[in-house]
Image: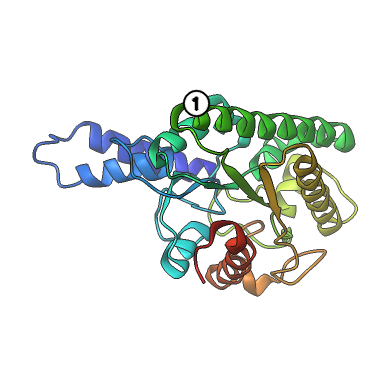
Amino acid sequence: MKNIRLIVLIGISLFLIHCDKKKDPLNDLETNLLCTSFAICDGETPAKTGIIGDSWTDILLGFPIVETLRPQLENRFNYQFAGATLGGKTLQQVVSQGLQFQVIDQGGADMKVVLLSLGGNDIQANLNEYIGNVDAVQAQRFARIKANLKQLIITGNAYKIARFGGPPIKWIIHGYDYPNPYMPAAIAGSDEGCKTKFDRIGLIVPDAAVFTSTQLDAFNNLLVEITREEPSLIYVDLRNTLGGKPNSRAELMLDCIHANNLGYTLLADKLARLIYPVTNIGF
């Protein structure tokens, strides 16, 4: 997945760089891509709700491979997001790049809520590191996720108050639903959570579904723990939407870790209902 995203991004970038912008009808496409995927916008696009997300919000640079959470919420529940959504994005990258500040700049003074879809790639990256040391590596990664998420919230709120005044932002983060490690990869390179990837790199687990579901439960528990320390953070549980533990139903999945259109419809329905009391949008 990461390879194909990179190839497409490089291809689009090279094409656009070598175009005469005065004559280029794709200039608007470039501008929209930068603003939507990277929160690099030409001025404010005022919005009450922001979003910073990974492939559960945009698998491939806005290309309609599948209608993920962001387009579902925009098209079906009337959300108008300011934000940065890009498949493969990690929480570590968001903090290091200061995307929380860019999204706040983009949304402006009316920004009240930011929806986060992050953490999965921090867990899934470099799976070979887990070999022979699963518990220790997971503990290290969870500690890093916790530190980065708290930093994102604290610095984001400080920045928002300093620039625009008013109350701090409410940050909503959803946990993921259970993977299905026995699914084949739908797109070359998108097999991070697949048993075939585990086998290929030598990560031997007694039961792939038990391994992935246990890890996902631990991640959701971590998010709950962080909400106890950060009053601005609100956690939403999306587990058991796609069939339940230990793995989501194949007919609702695109690949090992992503839902298909029907699956994301179910996830968006649940997410929209659960966040409505905070955002007051969609119903």
Q: Nearer the viewer, residue 240 or 125?
A: 240
The structure residue drawn at horizontal position 64% and vertical position 60%, both measured from the top left corner, is 184
Q: Is residue 192 left or right of residue 19?
A: right
Label 1 Cα neighbours within 10 Å, binned few <14 / some 14-19 / many ≥20? few
Amino acid type shown at disc 1: Ala
Residue placed furthest toward the front:
166
Residue 13 percent location from the top left of the image: 31, 36
The structure residue drawn at horizontal position 75% and vertical position 43%, both measured from the top left corner, is 227
Label 1 sits on a secondary structure element that is helix
Q: Is residue 97 left or right of residue 195?
A: left
Q: Is residue 103 left or right of residue 115?
A: left
Residue 241 percent location from the top left of the image: 70, 69
The structure residue drawn at horizontal position 62% and vertical position 36%, both measured from the top left corner, is 91
Examine the rendered structure and indicate whether residue 273 appears above or below residue 152: below
Q: How is the image coloured?
A: rainbow
Residue 233 visible from this viewpoint: yes
Total marks shown come to: 1
Residue 129 percent location from the top left of the image: 77, 32
Residue placed furthest toward the left:
23
Residue 132 visible from this viewpoint: no
Quarter residue 18 falls in = top left
Q: Nearer the viewer, residue 184 or 29?
A: 29
* Residue identified by numbered label 1: 162
Residue 239 percent location from the top left of the image: 74, 62
Quarter residue 75 falls in = bottom left
